[in-house]
Each structure stands twice: as structure tokens, then as C-alpha cells.
């Protein structure tokens, strides 16, 4: 989907927009109040911000309605491979012994992309949303209040969500909305390891940092990311600039050797947002967030 065709913001966009709107409200309220007054135009800006909050909390049209059937887990399942007969051939020519970075990436890409072609069900076990306070930068008068608000807005989602149709899997599993899961090359990968446990491979891939990733580029070749264009589409006009830097993004997964299927995956994506708000002056702020999503996949 092109950025200029966004109609329903993703849950990730919703959360970030709500956080930015809260910060905007602080700039227009607490900050100016501490200076001794607010301009007459505040009413218009606050009303706009409230409307954005209302719009951002509307459920996206792709949200599955199937009731969750599993409980959240805090670690990788130890026996997640399906017991039915394999429906897909093993990963082609998987090397024996120690693999090179290129071989691990090829193994991951081939197996990961089968999730959207072969999987019958994906369960998002949980999503951790962490405010990285060490990256918070803003006017001192707002830091303590903004830090508390960010932590309250980005609460963990521990309720499992089931995607039981191909359409839901394509729409919600990494990378949301794409028919593929990974297009990684060595250029995007900082580290890659693969452990052969006899019946399965355990893969870890850590990506290089990416600033303002666009669809299908950098971190966005394998992760759900937020783009400046998407944020500006949904945020108040007083948000003048917005940029992101993703760093230390890591995906871990288990691949069943008999079928080549990914049976478990965990995606962790820390990022720093740099924003400029124009309201009674120009103010800059930096916010750090981390999203961790954990999945089990059946076929």
C-alpha cells in the first residue's frame, strides 16, 4: 500500500499518534500555562487534537473477530511443530554444519515467507510495548509528566489474538499487508546465527540501524515499521517534523526441518522518534519505544 493511500491507520500508528497528541496537548497546556497564559488559538488546536485521538482509537477494518484460543507465553514454545503430515517440502538444500550469514538469511527468508502461503493459523501470543525512558528528551518542565503518560499509553497487550484466515494472516503478520514476510539481504543484517537442534533450526537475525525506513527498505524488509508520511497523515498540523531511527531490531524463530515451516517467531523493534512541535514557538522532543511481538504458527 502506498503511504498516500492510507485509510485505516495500523495499531502501531494509532498508538504513536495518540502518544504524540498527548505530548502536543502538554505543549499547548502545561507548557504555556507555566509561562503564564495561552493564546486565543488554543481552543482550535485542542479540538483538533481531541478529534485525532478519537480517530486514532477506531478499530482498523482488518482486526480479526475470532476469540483468542490460547494463553500468552513469555518464552518460545518447546514443542510448537504441527503433528500433521508435512504439506511442504523441507527448506531446499539447507547446509549442514556452520552456516554463513548469507545462508542463514536465505534459510530465514524461504521459511518465513511460507507463513503467508502455507499457514492455517497464526496466534500473536503477546505484544510488549516499552517506553525507553533513557531516550526521552524534551523541555525539563514536561519530562516527568510525559514519561508517566508514555508508560501509561504504551501498555503491554497480553491478550492472544488469532488470525485464522489467509487474509488475516497477510494483513497482520510481519510485514503487515504484504504477501511476503521477509526480503532481507546481507546489506540489512548485522548478525545472523543458526543453531541446529536436530529436528529444528533456531535462527536469530539482528538488523543494522535504519533511519526513516520506507516500505520494503531497510528494517521494513522484515519488520512492521512506522513511516513519517503515515504519522503526518494522522497527526495534528502542529506536528512540524517527525523522524524515526530503528536500532537493534532482532527476529528470532524456530524452523521445523522436516517441513521448512516457521513454527514460532519473536520480533523486537526498538526505535527513537524525533519530533518538532510548533506551538507558541518551536519545541523538539525525542521519545524511545520498543515493540516486541511473539507468534506461534500452525499449518
Image (cartoon, rainbow, N blue to C red):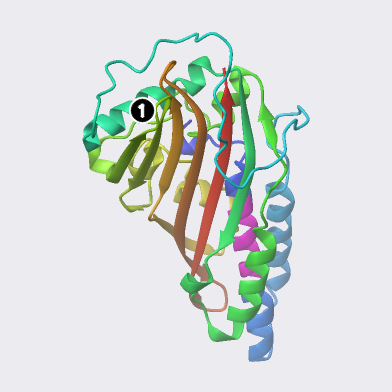
Up the image or down, 268 lies above or below 37; here it is above
Is residue 227 among the parts visible in the rendering? yes
- The location of residue 40, given as percent across then percent down, is 70, 76
**Residue lying at 60% horizontally and 36% vertically, measured from the top left:** 7
> What element does badge 1 sit on?
helix
Residue situated in front as seen by the camera: 188 or 227: 188
| Residue 18 sits in quarter | bottom right
In this rendering, would 207 be left or right of 34? left
Residue 6 point in image, percent of width and height:
55, 37
Q: Is residue 168 above or below residue 128?
A: above
Q: Is residue 182 magenta?
A: no
Q: Is residue 218 left or right of residue 120?
A: left
User: Is residue 182 rendered to the left or right of residue 27?
Assistant: left
* Label 1 neighbour load within 10 Å: few <14, some 14-19, many 20+: some
**Residue found at the far bottom of this picture:** 36
Question: 282 or 291, which lies in front?
Answer: 291
Question: Residue 24 versus residue 271: which sits nearer the camera?
Answer: 271
Percent x, y for residue 37?
69, 87
| Quadrant (top left/top right/bottom left/bottom right) for the C terminus | top right
Q: Pointer 1: what residue?
A: 109
Which residue is pictured at 74% across the width and 51% down the height? 54
Coordinates of residue 85 in the picture (x, y in percent):
54, 8
Question: In the displayed structure, does residue 201 sit left or right of residue 46?
Answer: left
Point out the stretch of residues depicted in magenta.
15-25
Give the main secondary structure of the magenta stretch: helix
Residue for point 51% across, 46% down: 230
Amino acid at each position: 500500500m502506498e503511504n498516500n493511500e492510507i485509510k485505516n491507520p495500523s495499531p502501531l500508528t494509532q498508538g504513536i499518534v495518540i502518544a504524540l497528541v498527548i505530548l502536543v496537548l502538554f505543549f499547548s497546556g502545561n507548557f504555556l500555562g507555566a509561562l503564564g497564559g495561552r493564546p486565543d488559538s488554543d481552543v482550535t488546536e485542542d479540538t483538533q487534537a481531541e478529534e485525532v485521538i478519537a480517530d486514532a482509537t477506531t478499530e482498523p477494518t482488518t482486526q480479526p473477530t475470532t476469540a483468542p484460543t490460547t494463553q500468552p507465553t513469555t518464552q518460545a514454545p518447546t514443542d510448537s511443530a504441527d503433528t500433521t503430515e508435512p504439506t511442504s517440502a523441507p527448506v531446499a538444500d539447507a547446509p549442514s554444519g556452520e552456516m554463513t550469514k548469507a545462508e542463514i538469511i536465505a534459510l530465514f527468508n524461504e521459511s518465513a515467507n511460507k507463513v503467508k502461503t502455507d499457514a492455517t493459523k497464526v496466534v500473536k501470543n503477546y505484544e510488549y510495548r516499552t517506553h525507553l525512558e533513557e531516550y526521552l528528551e524534551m523541555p525539563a518542565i514536561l519530562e516527568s509528566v510525559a514519561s508517566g503518560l508514555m508508560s501509561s499509553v504504551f501498555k503491554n497487550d497480553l491478550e492472544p489474538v488469532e488470525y485464522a484466515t489467509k487474509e488475516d494472516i497477510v494483513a497482520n503478520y510481519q510485514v503487515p499487508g504484504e504477501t511476503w514476510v521477509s526480503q532481507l539481504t546481507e546489506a540489512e543484517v548485522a548478525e545472523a546465527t543458526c543453531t541446529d537442534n536436530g529436528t529444528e533450526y533456531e535462527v536469530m537475525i539482528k538488523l543494522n540501524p535504519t533511519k526513516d525506513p520506507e516500505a520494503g527498505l531497510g528494517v521494513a524488509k522484515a519488520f512492521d515499521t512506522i513511516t513519517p508520511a503515515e504519522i503526518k497523515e494522522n497527526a495534528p498540523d502542529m506536528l512540524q517534523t517527525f523522524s524515526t531511527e530503528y536500532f537493534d531490531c532482532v527476529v528470532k524463530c524456530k524452523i521445523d526441518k522436516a517441513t521448512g515451516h516457521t513454527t514460532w517467531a519473536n520480533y523486537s523493534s526498538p526505535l527513537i522518534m524525533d519530533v518538532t512541535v510548533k506551538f507558541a514557538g518551536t519545541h523538539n522532543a525525542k521519545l524511545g519505544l520498543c515493540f516486541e511481538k511473539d507468534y506461534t504458527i500452525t499449518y
